[in-house]
Image (tube, rainbow, N blue to C red):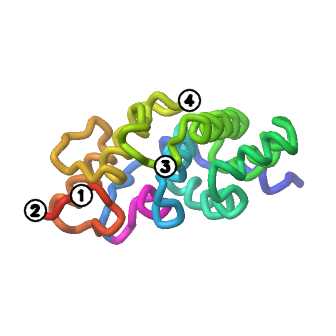
Amino acid sequence: MTPDRWRWSPPLREASRGFVPTSQDPPIQQLVLERDPSGWALVVATQMMAASNRFAVDRVWPVFFQTWPHPHVVMDDFVLGGDDGLLDAMAEVLHPTGCQRQKAWRITRMSLEWVGRGYVSRRPDSWARVQDLYGCGPYTGESWRLFVQGDLSARYEDSVVEAWAQLARDGKLSADLMPGRTAS
């Protein structure tokens, strides 16, 4: 008998094939922005999505953000518990998403940079590009641009982000959590 965490699951391509955003299925970016309007949780959620799929991340993010609700908690756990203790605990939570140890390290390092650079203030004059944070790539940047800055005029490279943007342009996606969006 094998432990639950070792059970086979379908390859990621098969599990996520055919995911088409709809207005009935709110984007994870909006869901996490409800918990953390600073945007840190959005960046963490996009890092969870790397080499994973929405179904696995939906199982993980509520527990993750209950344990580490903001970057200061990650920083405190890192300083007080040591990096191995934090990474092991975080990797355990992130296990269903795959690449859990790597994701735990990226989220920890990004969180330390977030606090160190003053990103918590969300003042435009204190910001560099969000992609300059450790482990943040184009998907994170595009998600930030759409969900935090509310930029509906852009065309997005990522097909899922573009689909969410199109739903928002068509008025089929709630704009309540898009603080940068201006009424048209």
The part of the chain drawn in magenta is 24-32
Secondary structure beneath label 1: loop
Circle 3 packing at 10 Å, graded few (<14), some (14-19), many (20+), is: few
Query: Residue at 32% of width from left, 69% of height from top?
Result: 176
Image quadrant where one finds the C terminus: bottom left
Looking at the image, residue 143 sits to the left or right of residue 40; the answer is: left
Q: Which residue is mark 3?
A: 121
Which secondary structure lies at badge 2? loop
- Callout 4: 10 Å neighbours few (<14), some, many (20+)? some
Please identify the quadrant where the N terminus is shown.
bottom right
Q: Residues within 10 Å of mark 2 (few under 14, many from 20)?
A: few
Label 1: few (<14), some or many (≥20) within 10 Å? Answer: some
Q: Inspect the image, locate mark 3, and give the three-letter code of the amino acid beneath it.
A: Ser
Q: Residue at x 74, y 47 (%)?
A: 90
Real-space Cα distance between discs 3 and 1?
19 Å
Residue 27: say if magenta. Answer: yes
Report the residue at 23% width, 48% height from top: 151
Which of disc 4 and disc 3 is earlier in sequence? 3
Label 1 sits on residue: 181
Residue that numbered label 2 is attached to: 184
